[in-house]
Image (tube, rainbow, N blue to C red):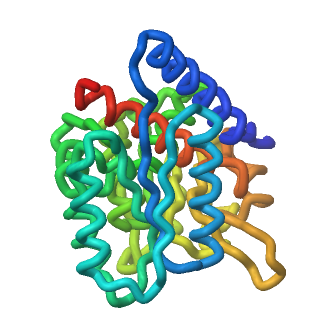
Amino acid sequence: MSAQIINGKAIAEEMLDQIKSRINQRLNSGKRAPSLAVILVGADPASSIYVRNKRLACEKVGINSIAYDLVSDIKESELFALIQKLNEDETIDGILVQSPLPSQIDEKLIIENINPTKDVDGFHPYNIGRLAIRQPTLRSCTPFGVIKMLNSVNIELKGLDAVVVGVSNHVGRPMALELLLAGCTVTSCHRHTKDLQSNIARADLVVAAAGKAGLIKGEWIKPGAIVVDIGINRLDSGKICGDVDFESAKDRAAWITPVPGGVGPMTVATLMENTLLAMELRGI
């Protein structure tokens, strides 16, 4: 058996084309394009690359991207003031604060101070809570992007035994909620899980979101399972890899996502869709 590779980059490109078409329809009817405020604090190389990719995607689909590149020693109060200004600005539809943030800034408080209707990352407790009670609006980009990706290759999720490895607020927890919403039976694994291997071995669907290179061995994967690797890890050699040992896992899985080129592009495309949706939900 050799797994079918899920080409997240190609699926994301199709999404971006659809978003661009929807925005052009708005423009042709006399409405304005969406606007996204992107806040980058400091000059972390990885964060700078992520922000650049998001800004390039905005340019591709016709979203106005407003850059706020701030110094790393900015005071928390100054960042709060900027977010409040953007919350009140009717021309801004989405607000994105790139993480991680410097140690003097409480990321949880920053997220909570973003207007939930402009929280296009889908991180605000209000938006996570709506997902939990099966009334989602703006949904966390990476987990929702995974759902969109699986749907695009016609994988039926209802009834699957799913295991999510990782329970972060931004990815692991909302991923479990998305899979519950899709009809899966979900197990969340974390650093206190006693037997990770046995949990993975019984799973029809494995979603890896721990951020640890090679954590999940290929021989653990149930033959015919679906493997989604959200992990992005840089090795000493400079190579980018996921949390799953891809080469051995692809010989057992039915479907598998590569790293890079799998989930990452879906995250950016879903962010673009969320920005357009945020505008539409506000009736603009």
Q: Is residue 73 above or below residue 174?
A: below
Q: Is residue 212 left or right of residue 103?
A: right
Q: Is residue 94 above or below residue 236?
A: above
- Quadrant containing the N terminus in the rendered view: top right
Residue at 58% in and 64% down: 231
Residue at 32% in and 82% down: 105
The reply to whether residue 276 is in sight is yes
Q: Is residue 17 above or below residue 77?
A: above
Which quadrant of the figure has residue 217? bottom right
Residue 274: x and y in percent read 40, 38
Residue at 80% in and 59% down: 247
Residue 80: x and y in percent read 25, 71
Q: Nearer the viewer, residue 171 or 120?
A: 120
Which quadrant of the figure has residue 188? bottom left
Q: Is residue 54 left or right of residue 284?
A: right
Q: Nearer the viewer, residue 214 or 103?
A: 103
Residue at the right extreme?
Answer: 237
Residue at 70% in and 75% down: 234
Q: Is residue 114 left or right of residue 153?
A: left
Residue 120: x and y in percent read 36, 47
Q: Nearer the viewer, residue 36 or 255?
A: 36
Number of labels in the image equals 0
